[in-house]
Image (cartoon, helix red, strand yellow):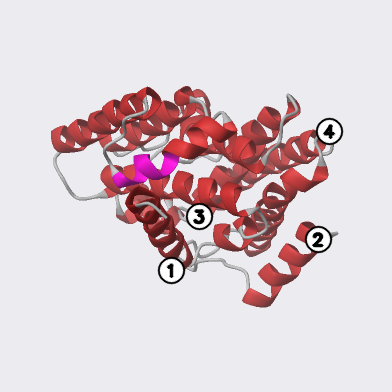
Amino acid sequence: MTAAASSDNALQSDIAAKVQASGTSFYAAMRLLPQARRDAMFAIYAFCREVDDIADEPAEVADKLRRLQGWRHEIARLYDGNPQHPIARALLPHVRAFDLRRSDFLDVIDGMEMDALEDIVAPDLAKLDRYCDRVASAVGRLSVRAFGATEPQADQVAHHLGRALQLTNILRDLAEDAERGRLYLPREELAAAGIATRIPAEIVVHPNLPQACRAVAALAKRHFASAHAAMAECAKGPMRPAAIMGAVYGAILDRLIAADWRDPRKRVSLPKWQKIWLAIRHGFL
């Protein structure tokens, strides 16, 4: 083995270890993939975590924008075949092997820039949809290629499942986001629920909060249904990781709906046994 190959293997192992240590349900779903595709997904995940950390860290806006712009330059180097950052180097063979699109990486960065520029509070539905497309569906578009899905409908899976997962995250993380001064519930649904304040800490304790959340949950449900319909038009094997993620997040959404946002500070999650059962059911049947 050459020194370069040994270094690349060590880099992939380090990235995989970090993904596993993060405790994300993503790790179990990705383990179903063949080695090369799994390595691609771990590298994509590492890239997303890297730019997400830039957007979320307590730093000056100008510094965040500078570092995100640095990643745009790094993506350009990646597609020129000369990446410098370790994560971009880990992505290089997979960009070539699985036809990962430059525009999707740039969309992810643009989504993180939306968070870096301002604390998003009560965006309109159009802005919320654009945000979900960039931070979630763009990741899905990269992922379906790494999974090996080649059908045109695979991008529709990414479109709808990405939005469904992100809306579920928004509904689950209301209190945590409010502590950061953020609130992603759309202003149209807040207005329909009679919530006039734009202060996140006040919105999450407003008595009419459940009404607004139910409307967003219904939107997420529609995206889940559309994703599943598109998934049925794709080969089953490459879609297994997406099916697992959809099942896990769909179950989380059902628990949120059952809890009805009576106490947004109480984080909803799934027990480990249920995650394992869902992984088995959707990964191997």
Amino acid type, residue under disc 2 in the picture: Phe
**Tag 1 secondary structure:** helix
x, y percent for residue 249: 64, 55
* Disc 4: which residue: 233
Can residue 255 be seen? yes
For residue 46, side relative to residue 118 (left or right): right
The first of marks 4 and 3 along the sequence is 3
**Tag 2 secondary structure:** helix
Look at discs 4 and 3 and give the one toward the viewer.
4
**Tag 3 secondary structure:** loop
The first of marks 3 and 2 along the sequence is 3
Instruction: State which quadrant residue 280 falls in.
Output: bottom right
Q: Which residue is rendered at x = 86% and y = 59% of the image?
A: 285
The first of marks 2 and 4 along the sequence is 4
Q: CA distance from mark 1 to mark 2?
A: 24 Å
Mark carried by residue 207? 3
Q: Which residue is rendered at x = 24% and y = 28% of the image?
A: 69
x, y percent for residue 96: 51, 31
* Disc 1: which residue: 21
The first of marks 1 and 2 along the sequence is 1
